[in-house]
Image: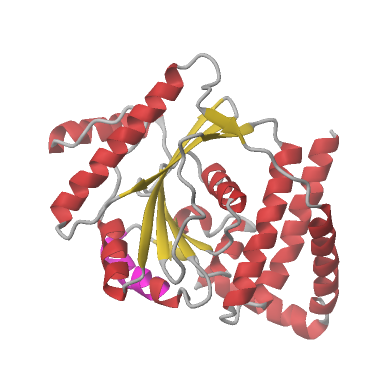
């Protein structure tokens, strides 16, 4: 019960914190980084005190903190659920002290989720509609807004485009047989056009850093994560597509192996969280002060207008 109460309080403060996020939207890159760092701390507090699950990281996972500045790394990950995967990635990025990241997300899935939609739209995360022709300029414009002058950046994408289910797996397997695509038992066929566009455009800008493959697997609230650096240096789209299919086959085999283990795989280390009470106290003070200042008549009208703008534009 205590865990749930603490979790509820933390989530409430996230909700209260949203007016601060929205009010500081005005192309303030540093504010966006600051906000995401604080939200990371809140998410970890919620996970630690409100969930019974454990996160394990493969011992062979490569170090995300080894990177070159002024570049944009890409993280590609499989998609098990709408919020859990985002939470796991945020926790891993926090482990490596990374708060300069943006998600490419499906507007239809996340835009109207309370708190999450506002958080994504108030930063430089890129919302797409899963229509390549419509999303082309959205992706290009979104990448152009990412500032790499001061800090290393990460761009996170889920190539499957949707969360997984048994029905979707069966449908994709039939599609794989029809189009001679590798058959996946635990994953969906990855969509490659958008990812190819991102990589090629970052090459053109000379901002492409490393490409990281995140494999996420949930076994009864025990979360297993593998991180591998992959090479997708290919200018031909058809060859690129085959490379992604191979990456997905390796990922599918890894998940199949984890499913076959009756007990915990000893190749994984448990991730431990440190209590950052000083930062949480600071967050509470800032949130309270900001909302006292925000909720007078003038700012309340501005706040309402911005909510309407974010949700209907």
- Foreground pick, 10 / 178: 10
Would you say 32 lies left or right of 241 here? right
| In-image side of 131 versus 143 (left or right) | left
Residue in the image at 46% along x and 73% along y: 146
Front residue of 36 and 179: 36
Q: Could you say where residue 181 lies in the image, as x and y percent from the top left?
A: 18, 37
Count all numbered tags in the image, as a single digit.
0
Q: Position of residue 276 (x, y in %)?
A: 78, 52
- From the viewer's perspective, is residue 127 above or below residue 270? below
- Span of residues in magenta: 131-142
Please tell me in which quadrant of the rendered image residue 29 appears.
bottom right
Q: Can see residue 149?
A: yes
Residue 289 rendering spot, x and y as whole percentages: 85, 72
Does the rendering let one see residue 307?
Answer: no
Q: Give the quarter of the image for residue 68.
A: bottom left
Q: Position of residue 57 (x, y in %)?
A: 54, 36
């Amino acid at each position: 019960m205590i865990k749930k109460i603490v979790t509820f309080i933390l989530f409430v403060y996230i909700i209260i914190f949203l007016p601060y996020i929205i009010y500081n939207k005005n192309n303030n890159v540093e504010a966006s980084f600051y906000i995401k760092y604080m939200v990371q701390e809140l998410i970890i507090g919620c996970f630690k005190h409100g969930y019974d699950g454990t996160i394990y990281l493969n011992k062979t996972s490569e170090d995300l903190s080894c990177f070159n500045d002024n570049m944009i790394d890409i993280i590609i990950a499989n998609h098990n659920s709408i919020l859990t995967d985002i939470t796991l990635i945020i926790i891993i990025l926090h482990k490596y002290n990374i708060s300069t990241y943006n998600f490419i997300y499906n507007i239809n899935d996340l835009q109207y989720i309370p708190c999450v939609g506002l958080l994504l739209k108030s930063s430089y995360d890129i919302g797409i509609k899963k229509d390549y022709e419509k999303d082309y300029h959205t992706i290009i414009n979104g990448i152009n807004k990412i500032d790499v002058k001061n800090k290393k950046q990460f761009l996170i994408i889920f190539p499957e485009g949707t969360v997984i289910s048994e029905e979707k797996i069966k449908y994709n397997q039939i599609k794989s047989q029809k189009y001679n695509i590798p058959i996946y038992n635990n994953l969906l066929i990855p969509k490659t056009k958008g990812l190819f566009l991102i990589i090629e455009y970052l090459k053109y800008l000379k901002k492409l850093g490393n490409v990281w493959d995140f494999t996420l697997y949930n076994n009864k609230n025990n979360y297993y994560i593998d991180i591998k650096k992959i090479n997708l240096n290919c200018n031909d789209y058809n060859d690129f597509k085959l490379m992604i299919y191979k990456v997905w086959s390796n990922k599918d085999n890894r998940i199949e192996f984890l499913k076959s283990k009756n007990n915990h795989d000893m190749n994984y280390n448990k991730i431990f969280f440190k209590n950052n009470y000083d930062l949480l106290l600071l967050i509470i003070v800032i949130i309270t002060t900001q909302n006292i200042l925000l909720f007078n008549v003038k700012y309340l009208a501005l706040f309402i207008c911005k909510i309407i703008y974010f949700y209907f534009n």
